């Protein structure tokens, strides 16, 4: 094809038909430019198609992570929240001399349950999001509402994780120092440890610890509600995008 155009140009020059040669040369340049523009357009279209495919994969991964976080918080916190609060209230009632213990072992195990997730809580994973940030692929999400919702969710996740650590009283550490916890026999407490635990629980220091842990528990409960709300809102936006509604 190149040789064909070259022969035409040479023929026009040989015949001293410069005007026609000039018009032909300009036309040839226009054709080349058009060819380049078409090639660029095809390349852009193909790149946009690949980006859209990659974006869909990213959103699906994020959606799975958000759903897993909801399940994690449900299993580790929400399902145990009421029992934990009741355990701490029982301990508080005992400290205030408003309780007559009928079963010492049952009571001590009840109080010990107040230490679940007392050392802080992660509120969820952020592996998929961190990978997007580190690779720069977060820019492949071309909807600002979704991108902002995702950033707000994971930003809040990080913030409440740090707050939970600050507010944690490490209640479980206190009870673990009074009795060894055996996962194969979690309800066992020796007679000696039972006596020591009752003595330790009947003190102003322990009452303050119980109040701190209750405050921490209420904060975690509120954090979980907000995490779930933001997560569900983000999942809805992702679903709309995947269903081509955005």
Image (tube, helix red, strand yellow):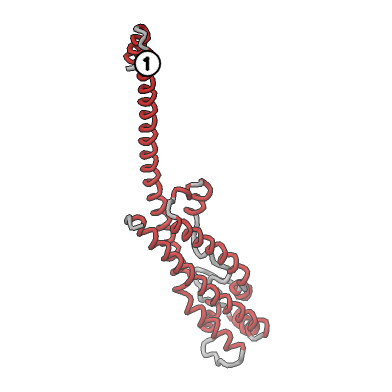
Q: Quadrant of residue 217?
A: bottom right
Residue shown at 33%/9% (left/top)? 11
Q: In which quarter of the image is residue 143?
A: bottom left
Residue shown at 53%/79% (left/top)? 109
The answer to whether residue 193 is above or below residue 32 is below
Quadrant holding the N terminus: top left
Helix, strand or loop at disc 1?
helix
Quadrant holding the C terminus: bottom left
- Residue 239 in picture, x, y percent from top left: 36, 59
209 displayed left or right of 148: right
Residue at label 1?
19
- Residue 30 in picture, x, y percent from top left: 37, 26
Q: Using the rendered image of the protein, determine whether residue 201 is visible from the camera's viewpoint.
A: yes
Who is closer to the viewer here, 242 or 31? 31
- Residue 38 in picture, x, y percent from top left: 35, 33
Q: Using the rendered image of the protein, determine whether residue 192 is visible from the camera's viewpoint.
A: no
Q: In which quarter of the image is residue 41?
A: top left
């Amino acid at each position: 094809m190149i040789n064909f155009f070259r022969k035409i140009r040479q023929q026009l020059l040989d015949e001293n038909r410069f005007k026609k040669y000039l018009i032909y040369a300009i036309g040839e340049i226009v054709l080349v430019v058009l060819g380049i523009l078409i090639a660029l357009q095809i390349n852009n279209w193909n790149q946009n198609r690949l980006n859209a495919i990659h974006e869909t994969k990213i959103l699906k991964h994020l959606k799975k992570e958000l759903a897993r976080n909801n399940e994690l918080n449900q299993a580790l916190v929400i399902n145990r929240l009421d029992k934990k609060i009741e355990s701490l209230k029982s301990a508080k009632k005992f400290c205030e001399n408003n309780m007559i213990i009928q079963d010492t072992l049952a009571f001590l195990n009840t109080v010990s349950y107040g230490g679940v997730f007392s050392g802080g809580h992660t509120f969820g994973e952020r592996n998929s999001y961190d990978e997007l940030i580190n690779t720069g692929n977060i820019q492949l999400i071309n909807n600002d509402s979704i991108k902002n919702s995702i950033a707000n969710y994971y930003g809040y996740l990080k913030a409440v994780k740090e707050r939970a650590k600050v507010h944690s009283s490490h209640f479980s550490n206190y009870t673990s120092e009074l009795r060894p916890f055996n996962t194969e026999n979690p309800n066992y407490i020796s007679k000696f440890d039972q006596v020591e635990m009752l003595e330790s629980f009947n003190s102003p220091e322990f009452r303050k610890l119980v109040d701190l842990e209750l405050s921490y528990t209420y904060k975690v409960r509120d954090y979980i509600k907000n995490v779930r709300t933001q997560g569900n809102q983000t999942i809805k936006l992702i679903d709309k995008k995947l269903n081509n509604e955005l």
